[in-house]
Image (cartoon, rainbow, N blue to C red):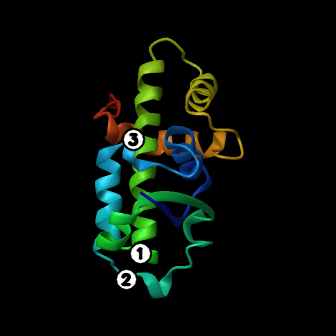
Amino acid sequence: MDQITVEVFVKPYVAKYLENNYGSPVDLSLCTNIRKIFLQFLTNPSSEYDKRIDAKTDNGARKPVYIIISEYEFYNYGWELTLTNMLNFNGMIEEIIKTRMHDYMFILETIEKKITRRIQIFRDDLGFSEDDFTYDAIKKDFYRHRIKNFNCKRPQKTI
């Protein structure tokens, strides 16, 4: 059976995550849930935002990754993502990465108080370099979303 690849433009850390976990070219058969959603994007092309999107530059989605599909999937699902679905796919993988990042930060907080060290452990475990996912971006996202993600209450001011 022949293998065909679909080119998808994603953010650098999304590309690194996909390549580290599913190979290069990316073989999503290793994760059936992500594969099903990817095939759904191929099957139901959405062009809702296509006129406003440049996949190579918008939202930092600049790096191409190549995702393997079979000949059967090529003929039955399609072979091209619309720009809208490309960004939707990118956003879905981003959500997986950021959820994992928040889990790491929350768990590591019990043994490591320094945010710098926790971020380094997270990046080392997932194989990200500073170029892929910067320290500042991780720290900013963590502080921005940690209250709502962990249902933490803000400290009450006492009068």
Q: Where does the C terminus fall, quadrant-wise?
A: top left
Residue 66's spot in the image, x, y percent?
55, 59
Mark 2 lies on a secondary structure that is loop
Q: Where does the N terminus fall, quadrant-wise?
A: bottom left
Q: Earlier in the sequence, mark 1 or mark 2?
A: 2
Judge whether 38 appears above or below 32 on screen. below
Q: Earlier in the sequence, mark 3 or mark 2?
A: 3
Residue at the spot of label 1: 84
State if disc 2 and disc 1 touch (CB < 8 Å).
yes
Q: Which mark is residue 72?
A: none
Q: Earlier in the sequence, mark 1 or mark 3?
A: 3
Residues at marks 1 and 2, CA–CA distance in whole angstroms: 6 Å
Residue 7's spot in the image, x, y percent?
54, 67
Residue 29's spot in the image, x, y percent?
38, 46
Mark 3 lies on a secondary structure that is helix
Residue at the spot of label 2: 47
Residue at the spot of label 3: 30
Q: Residue furthest bottom?
A: 51
Mark 1 lies on a secondary structure that is helix
Residue 150's spot in the image, x, y percent?
32, 33
At label 2, which amino acid type do we have? Ser
- Label 2 neighbourhood size at 10 Å, few (<14), some (14-19), many (20+)? some
